[in-house]
Amino acid sequence: MTLTNDQAVFTNGVNVTELSKTIGALRHHPELGAFQFRANNNWFEGGHNRSTIQGFFGCGKEDETRAKPFIFDADEPPMLHGGDKGANPVEFVLHALAACMTTTMVYHAAARGIEIGAVSSELEGDIDVRGFMGLCDDVRKGYHDVRVKMRVQSNASPDQLAQLAKYSPVYDIVSNSLPVHVHIETF
């Protein structure tokens, strides 16, 4: 539903008035589109580690709006000899993919005046842990297949909504390879 609030137009809970201003600013000043997101991680024991996410750079400056960091614990389930103190990293990938595809679809739909009443998703990722454990060189270490099933309440077509969801940065990361540079220091 499109709502107005003091001259602002909201569709799908997105302030389309402000979103349009942001799109205009990015068209005129493309350098404002360069963002850098960061995470810090510390290991505790076994598979248990914790990531802290707070600061990021965007729109030409360091963000100062987050008063407290977001904290995510990761571990492995007991079947993989962990303490089950958090979702495992490949489960976080599924969460990131679902969250990003949902947000992306909702925002792109709002920008196009497409109303969405509800979105729910089910994701499955298939992995053969023999690759991760180094037991088989011809087995991929990560997911070899991911399936996303989204249910969307909207008058838009499933094809149109799928195209909007595929603007997702995490969809791009998961479906395309990218360089990851690893640097390790000892102390």
Image: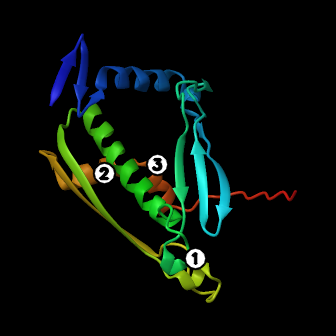
Measured as percent of width and height from the top left, residue 78 is found at 50, 76
Residue at 78%, 57% in the rendered image: 183
Of the image marks 1 and 3, the number of the one nearer the N terminus: 1
Q: Nearer the viewer, residue 151 or 95?
A: 95
Earlier in the chain: of badge 3 and badge 2, it is 2
Residue at numbered disc 3: 169
Dot 2 amino acid type: Gln
**Res 163 label:** 2
Between the residue at mark 3 and the residue at mark 2, the CA separation in whole angstroms equals 13 Å
Q: Secondary structure at mark 1?
A: loop
18 relative to 47, above or below: above
The answer to which of marks 2 and 1 sits earlier in the sequence is 1
Q: Residue 159's mark?
A: none
How far is the residue under mark 1 from the one under mark 3? Answer: 22 Å
Are dots 3 and 2 in contact, CB under 8 Å? no
From the image, which quarter does the N terminus lie in? Answer: top left
Observer-nearest residue: 32 or 140? Answer: 140
- Regarding mark 3 in the picture, which secondary structure is present there? helix
- Residue type indicated by callout 3: Pro
Left or right: 156 in relation to 101: left
- Marks 2 and 1: CB-CB under 8 Å? no
Nearest the viewer among 135 and 30 is: 135
Q: Which residue is mark 1?
A: 141
Give the spatial CA distance, label 2 vs label 1: 29 Å
Look at the picture and state if 49 lies above or below 102. below
Q: Residue at x 51, y 61 (%)?
A: 176
At 66% from the left and 60% from the top, the residue drawn is 44
